[in-house]
Image (spheres, helix red, strand yellow):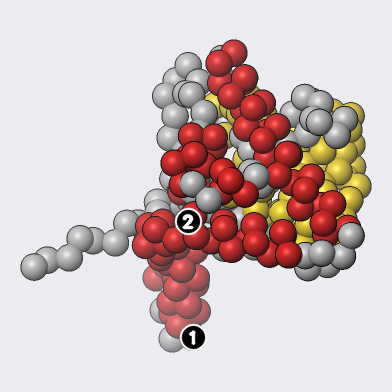
Amino acid sequence: MVSAPEPRLAHPLPGAIGLSHLSPYDWQAADGICGGSPHLHLVCTEAYVVTGGRGAVQTLSPDGYRDIPLEAGSLVWFTPGTVHRMVQGDDLRVTVLMQNSGLPEAGDAVFTFPPGVLADPEAYAAAASLPPGTGPATEAAARRRRDLAVEGYLGLREALVAGDDGPYRAFQRAAARLVRDKVPTWRALWRAGALATAERTGAQLDALADGEPAHLAEATAHEAAPTRRGGFGMCGRRDEYALPGTTPPHRPE
């Protein structure tokens, strides 16, 4: 039996990272704050590079609850398991850099929905999914999704601030159970992207050590521009690039 070839990520960004641009939602949530849908990632570290405006990112982690101010020039990143909520202040604009391009788009993100939703994979999938496109129906569904995530998030935050990390730990375990079946797909994407990129660097170092830098003959440049603007992401309206492994495929509007 011949095994299927490993997928190959063509022309990855440096380090095989993912890239998008975000402006947090300006919809007011139950606690009076405008912003995105709280969630965590299971294996990817995420970074925000603030390019304009003001706002904040709220995080829940073993360190407790933090409210980190964001303004032009700010850089903040958070590791797997950190619940994060992007908050809109005044025209906040962020460039998002995501480790392991392709994994978040393959499901490496779990919303902080209430426990009853997290315990039912079908209910979770229904609450997390959005209709295609960027029209009113998609906007309404994105807002409902955000509000449900905030509902669960506020309970986690209240307990953590009170010194009880039990609900937060339980949410992490529930998130891990939800994504367990996706791990084989993630592993293939990781091998094709981040791991393959690191291995190429190792081969290039070997070539330099041997005085045979043949890979330099393949030098070239690539360019790209956003292929969809204003899509509904987890945290806000998102500009996407059709780069392999970095953003989900979408149909022209």
Q: Is residue 5 above or below residue 128?
A: below
Disc 2 packing (10 Å; few <14; some 14–19; many ≥20): some
Taking the image as drawn, is residue 231 in sight? yes
Q: Give amino acid for label 2.
A: Val
Q: Give amino acid for label 1.
A: Ala
State which mark lies toward you, 2 or 1: 2
- Can you give x and y, in whole percent of width and height, for residue 126 in the image? 48, 34
Count the marks.
2
Indicate which disc residue 209 carries. 1
Q: Is residue 51 above or below residue 60?
A: above
Circle 2 SS class: helix
The residue lying furthest to the front in this view is 116
Question: Relative to the observer, which residue lies in front, 71 or 220?
Answer: 71
- Can you give x and y, in whole percent of width and height, for residue 206 in the image? 45, 82
Q: Is residue 179 above or below residue 88?
A: below
Q: Residue at x 66, y 26 (%)?
A: 143
- Can you give x and y, in whole percent of width and height, for residue 119 in the image? 53, 51
The residue lying furthest to the bottom in this view is 210
Question: In which quadrant is the N terminus drawn?
Answer: bottom left
Taking the image as drawn, is residue 218 in sight? no
Question: Relative to the observer, which residue lies in front, 228 or 58?
Answer: 58
Question: Relative to the observer, which residue lies in front, 39 or 12?
Answer: 39
Position of residue 170 in the picture relative to residue 216 (left or right):
right
- Can you give x and y, in whole percent of width and height, for residue 25 in the image? 74, 29
Q: Residue at x 44, y 41 (%)?
A: 122
Q: Residue at x 68, y 64 (%)?
A: 169
Circle 1 SS class: helix
Residue that mark 2 sits on: 179
Task: Place residue 36 in its image quadrant.
Answer: top right
Q: CA distance from mark 2 to mark 1?
A: 42 Å
Circle nearer the N terminus (2, 1): 2
Q: Residue at x 76, y 53 (%)?
A: 156
